[in-house]
Image (cartoon, grey):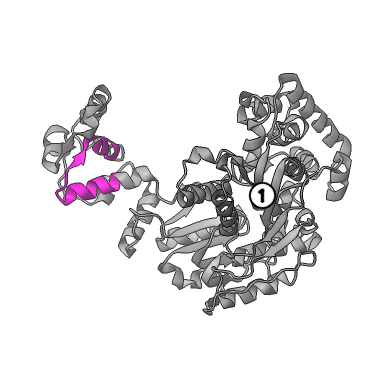
Amino acid sequence: MSVAPTIILGPPGTGKTTKLLSYIDDLLGSGTNPENIGYVSFTRKAVQEARDRAVAKFKLPVEKFRYFRTLHSLALENTILDTSKLMDDEKFAEFSEIMGLRVEIKDVEDDETGMRMYNNKYLNILQNARHRGVPLRTEYNAGGYDFPFTALYKFAEGYTKFKQARKYFDFTDMIEEYIREGNDIALDALFIDEAQDLNYLQLQMKEKLQGNALKTYVAGDDDQAIYSWSGVEPKHFIEMTGNVVNLQQSYRCAQSIHRIAMRIRNRIKFKRDKTWSPRQDEGKIVRHADLYFAKQTAHGKWIMMGRTKNICGRLKQFCREKGFYYATRYGNSVSEKRLDALQTWFDLQQGETVTLAALNKMYFYISPKDRIKRGKKEQLKKYLKESSAAKKELVSIEKVQKDWGLLVDTSVSWFDLFTNYPYEDKLYLESMTRRGEDIFSKPRIRIETIHGMKGGEEDNVLLLLDMGKYAYDAYKRDDDDEHRVWYVAVTRARNELHLVDPNSDYGYRI
C-alpha cells in the first residue's frame, strides 16, 4: 500500500525545484543511496535541470542519478520494447500510404514528453482518449466534431492493426506497456515534478512507481496546467490528497506583475487554494496600442511571446524590420554558418589570421567571378578533403590572396563580397550591425509561444494579447484553460511586462 505523498505547491518563481533538491539533500545526508532516488517529470528539460543541479550541488557523478528521467524514458528502459519499433516519420509515412491520407507529426514540444500534435485530427482525438482514459466515443462526443464517428473508428482500428502487425509502438504505448508489464522499481524516495502536466494515463504510471517507494513528493502548480490539448486535466492534480506544502515567496515576480497575475488567477474557477507573495520591488507594467510603439525593446534582454506560432510570426517580422537579433526554438535569426563567414572576413580585415576551414566556409558565400580566381574555390575544398591537418592551417589576408586566389582587398565590405547571400538577409544583417546588435553573442531576444516558454523567465517580457480564432473559440468553450495560459505568460516576467493590445477581435483582455 502506497504512502500518501507530500504535495508541494509551487507558484511561479517560488523555488519548487530548489525545494525538491533540499529534500534530496536531506536524504543523501542521512545515507540514502542516490541510485535509490527517483526524480521524474513531464519534460526532458525539467529533468535535466534537476539532475544538473543535483550533480553540481552534491558533487556526485551523473551516473549515480540513474532514475532522474522523463516518464517516457523510464518506461522505455523498464519494459522489453524495442526502440527501433517506435513510431517515427518513416513509419507514419508507411501508415499514410496504407490509409490513403497524410499522417505526420505536426509539432513536438519536447522529444521525450510524448506530447505531440499531428496533422491528422483522427489521431489527435484517438491519443487524447487514451491519455484521458476514456472511450473513443466519449472523447468524440465531447468535441462536437463535424464528421461521423464511423470515420474516426475506422481510422483508430486501422492504426491499431497497423502497429500490432508490425509490432510498432508510440509514446502512449510506452506508458501503457509499463503499467501492464513494466519492472517494479524499489525506491527510497520518489519525486514527481511538474505533476500538473501529467495526464490520467501518466498518473497511473505515477501510482505504480509510488507503490514501490517509501516516500513520495509531488510538486506542481495547477494554475500552470496548460496542456489540455494533450489530454491533461488539471482536476487530477487539484484533487490529489496528501500533506500539502505551499511555497509562498516568489523570487521572480515584482509586485506589479504579481497584481496582474492575481487578476488573471481570480478568473480561474476550478483551482487549489494557495497563496504567494511577490518580491518587494514594484516592477513595471507597460501597455502599447501597437507592437511598433514598444521602443524599449531596442535594448536589453527580452522574451517575446505570442499565443500561437502564427502570432509569433508578427514578432519575427517586427525584429527583422527593426534590426533586432533574436532566437527561436529552431535557431537564431542568422545562421551560425553565415555568422562564421562574417567573422572570418572581419578577422581578415583586422589583420588577423584565420584557419583554412574558416576560409572555406567563407568562400561558400562568394561567387568566383571577379572575386576568386578560377578553380581556387574547388582547389581549396579538395585540399581540405585530402588533409585533415589542413583545416587548422592559419592564413593571413596576403596568403589568401596569393595562394587561394582572393581577388579583392580588405577595403571591400562584406555586403559587396558575399554575393551568394540572400539579399533580404544581407539587408537584415546590415541593419543589425548598423544599430550595434552583438551578433556574435547569444541573441538578446527570445521569441516563443506561451506554451514553449513555460518554465522560462526574463527581466523583460513583451506579450501580444492576440489569441487567434482557434484559441478564442476554445476560450469561449472553457475559459479556465485559457486563463491558465495567460497566467503562465505574465509570470515569465521578473521586472517589466509589456502588453500589446490585440489587433483583432480575438484578443485576451487583461
Residue 363 is one of the magenta-drawn residues = no
Q: 477 and 147: which one is in front?
A: 477
- Compared with residue 302, is residue 4 higher up or lower down, i.e. above or below? above
Element at badge 1?
strand
Question: Which residue position holds label 1?
Answer: 192
Packing grade of label 1 (10 A; few <14, some 14-19, many >=20) is: many
- Compared with residue 12, is residue 332 higher up or lower down, i.e. above or below? above
Where does residue 25 sit, x and y in percent of width and height?
A: 55, 53
Q: Amino acid at mark 1?
A: Ile
The quadrant of the rendering that contains the N terminus is top right
Where does residue 109 sit, x and y in percent of width and height?
A: 60, 46
Residue at 74%, 50% in the rendered image: 232
Residue at 50%, 69% in the rendered image: 292
Residue 349 is one of the magenta-drawn residues = yes
Is residue 339 in view from this perspective? Answer: yes
Where does residue 409 sit, x and y in percent of width and height?
A: 15, 46
Residue at 77%, 59% in the rendered image: 238
The secondary structure making up most of the magenta span is: helix
**Start-end of magenta stretch:** 341-362
- Compared with residue 170, is residue 269 higher up or lower down, i.e. above or below? below
In-image side of 441 versus 318 (left or right):
left
Is residue 455 in view from this perspective? Answer: no
